[in-house]
Image (spheres, coloured by chain):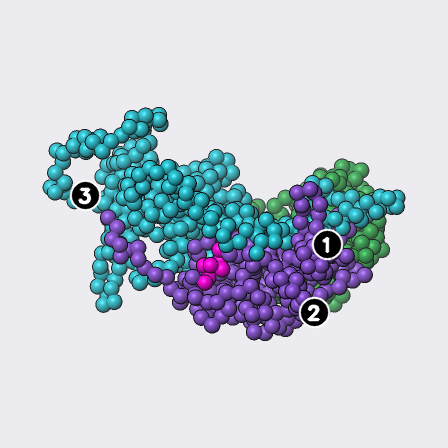
Chain colours: A purple, B green, C cyan
Amino acid sequence: MIETEKFSRSYNYGFIDESTKKEIRRKILKAVAVPGYQVPYSSPEMPISRGWGTGGLHASLSLIGPDDVFKIIDQGSDASVNACNLRNFVRRMTDCRTTFDTAEATIIQTRHRITEEVLTDKQIIVFQVPQPEVLRSVERYEFKTRQMHAEADYAKMWVSLYESYVKFGAIMQGAGYPVKVNKRYIMTPSPIPRWDVPNLSHSDTLHVFAAGREKRIHCVPPHTLVEPLEFEDIKFMVESFDGIQCSVTGGTDAFMDEIYESDGDRKHTINDSNFMDKVRVGIRPRQRLFKNPA
Amino acid sequence: MVTDNSDNWLLRVRGLTKIYGDPISNTIRYTGPKYGTNQCPETDAIVACAEIDFDLFHGEVLGVVGESGSGKSTLVQLLYFDQESTGGDVRFRGFENGDVNLLTVSNQKKRYIRNHLMGMVYQNPRDGLNFKFSAGGNIAEKLLMAGEFHVGRIRDRSSSLLERTEVPVPRMDNAPGSFSGGMQQRVQISKAIANNPPLLFLDEVTTGLDVSVQAKVLDLIRGLQRQLGISMIVVSHDLSVIRMLTDRTMVLKNGRIVEAGLTDQILQDPQHEYTQLLVSSLL
Amino acid sequence: MGYVAIKGGEDAIENASRLTEYERVNSRTKPLEIDQIRTQLGSLVDKIMGEGSLYAPEHAALALKQAQGCPLEGAFILRAYRATLNRSYSSDIVDTRSMRVVRRISSAFREAPGGQILGPTRDYTVRMLNTDLASETKEDFERFISEFDFLDTDVLEEPKPFSKIMDILMEQGMLHGVDEDEDRRVVDITREAVKFPAPRSASLQMLARAETGGLCALAYSSMRGFGSTHPTIGELRVGKVKVVVSDRRGRKRCIGNIKVTESEVISKLKQKSRDPVPYMTLGYGLCFGHNETKAICMGILDRAMRVKDEHPANSQEFVLYHTEGVESYGFTNHLKLPHYVTFQSGLDNLRKAMKRKQDAMKSGEKPLAVPANAEDAVDPAPELL
């Protein structure tokens, strides 16, 4: 029979044991020291599924302390189902305060977006990354992609962009647009939309990209040059929402969600839920907007 | 020995050796034409090339002839870094004026040399072309590696290369898989010369093509050589290819050079028994 | 704060979880006891202990109960629980030669020294649905057990350890273990990410935690034609082994027995260039509990991955990454998460591309290019999403 004692253990602060948290922090430091380089790390199992933000939790929980204020968004939204689940988990494991307010948070975990509101040097943004290897689409073996990164052998990646242009007249990479960090490593900025990509460059904030399933962490430190791959004559372009207004707030110049009504009508709303809340009450937080070249 | 005291060399090769498997000290001594085998009698080691010495001069076309297993393809693959050599010293005027042994430079530098300073055309187009990319994409790969990041200029350059090698330019954006064998070879040639390398390797490029197509591809290569003054090493088992393209020839057997000299001389007056056999089969 | 249907928020997930629980409880049948699961669903418990990477039958049974019987989910719960446990000791190497064997067979020899022991196996039964089990009672259990009353378990002698069948072949030089040139470093895959090519220790650890079905599929592919592993089972043994740790003063302490399944699979002849005498090679599998399929498939794949060939089962990266049950289960299911931001980004590209082509056609221009392969005309890096 099961003795009750056997099932009564409580968890460590932040769920992960201290030595593993320390290991993850050291790997983050290494990733900061070599911007864009994918650092392998232990990636312990978490009580959420692989592919559902385990990497993000590893980074957040190894960095977080009792004084931190934690915000988590999924697809730009604080209220998205998975974000709610992870927020509850982090709150339970750390007793930290959680918030929806971008400006107030000290650690922001995100899936697929950077906040519209500009982040500061007091904040860290942690990305949940499904596939950290930017070269996976042109080379399936890890063994080879590591060598390609070591030798900065990126021709195949460039040819895939060229081929995309030849077929479609534009570089068709949607989200997760490949970027070159600090003029050295090519990396995938997790699948954030192109809209967010320019905000990685020379930002005041530390960006931590953590891929739990693939066991890799890479970083874009503050004030680091991040350049989307583009040709001299075929330029990187962000999604255009020209002339599109948020149907709730009337706001413009933000990444928009496309919403279909039951009668087939289409309307738009601002994707970033906290940003939208602020716009609705007449506050326009500071943004960095990228203008597509003519 | 195909060497010379003259200082006009582009490529100087000394002691180039490739052994597969585990050699022992006598492996090289007990293999070669004298024993009629490449295989070490004591271990299974195979000597593909043993202590090959030769010079290639500026603007020269050097033929390498021999039967299959003679080591002729291995030789160019070693020089193009497709395979790692067991030993030797290779100097190339195009890189640091020939002051360093190419076999010892870093992988990154080897890649630079392959892409900027050398070209290779393989017997099988699948070795030289990426069939997932379009013909133009294959050429673009070389140009991108050389630092050309302007799509318009890449496409102009690719078109002119394809035009030069007589590939219909409108097919530039098609995949090489949809091309005939002869046209695949022409695309390979375009790719190989994309960055105007001073040195080109041609490994059995016409083997497997129809006779009429063969003649056209050979004409093309000869024409390019005249226009560009590019130095070439041409590997073939076919003496008629060697006769048509090359100035000088080395005959390989069991991984050794058994005879070398001016192509005309070798064809007219072969000295080595094996060369005589080769030539008699041609005539 | 629901702006859009997808943003159900906290209430929705709470209710979704309660609804799952409702489905379990709604029938008002007798609640399953942990011990019932542990004993009567032993094969399943063993399977998820292996995949969950934790030898704890009661915890495994509990995980299965919580997962409502889903083995992938059960293994996942167990694995996550395992990650929170402190590691107090590392055990000595388990010696399977001193195993208390309950089953041990060799298909390589008709008679093995020490004898073939069939032990508990369903191998030689007909798989007809046993309708008697539908009305089974506790009395039936007792009646069955009473048939064994003549056995006096107190006087049964301790089974003698069996020598290994492999030893016979090894002594004659016909079978070699690990080649000298193989990577024999010992790493701990739970403490550092595996890098490829991985040492054999990492490879075997990953196989031992891999999902049984995934291993079975790939091992089968290697036997069936996508590979060249034609195995013979040298020895398959199931039984209990002692786990021994050294305490802080260096004294050896036995902390218990665990049931394991071990397979040694003999594969085809090999010949090395330096030493041209041919010999047979070995594939090895060892996993928690009684799970013969897993141990055998581990053996096949251990061998296949060390052969240079181009089939899926010969690639370490392919085999180890894709048989990892917790990861593959999680990632395939993550597709259910909302992806509307990345999808929006793709829509934007597609709309622009459609417009360019339509404009070009309207103005009578020749389109920019004919796609190289129309069916390949996809996003250059779709996996990144």
The residue wearing badge 3 is C159
Q: Which residues are magenta?
A: A85-91
Q: Which residue is mark 1?
A: A171
Instruction: From the image, state whether disc 2 or disc 1 is nearer to you.
Output: 1
Front residue (pair B188, A222): A222
Q: Which residue is pictured at 48% across the width and 67% down the height?
A: A97
Q: CA distance from mark 2 to mark 1?
A: 38 Å
In depth, the one of A155 and C37 nearer the eye is: C37
* Distance between mark 3 and mark 1 Cα atoms: 70 Å
The residues bearing labels 3 and 2 have C-alpha atoms spaced at a distance of 74 Å
Q: Main secondary structure of the magenta part?
A: helix
Q: Which residue is mark 2?
A: B96
Viewer-nearest of discs 3 and 1? 1
Instruction: Tell me residue B107's x, y (percent).
Output: 61, 62
Residue A279 position, x and y percent, is 66, 64
Q: Residue type at mark 1? A: Ile
Give above or below for C343 relative to C85: above
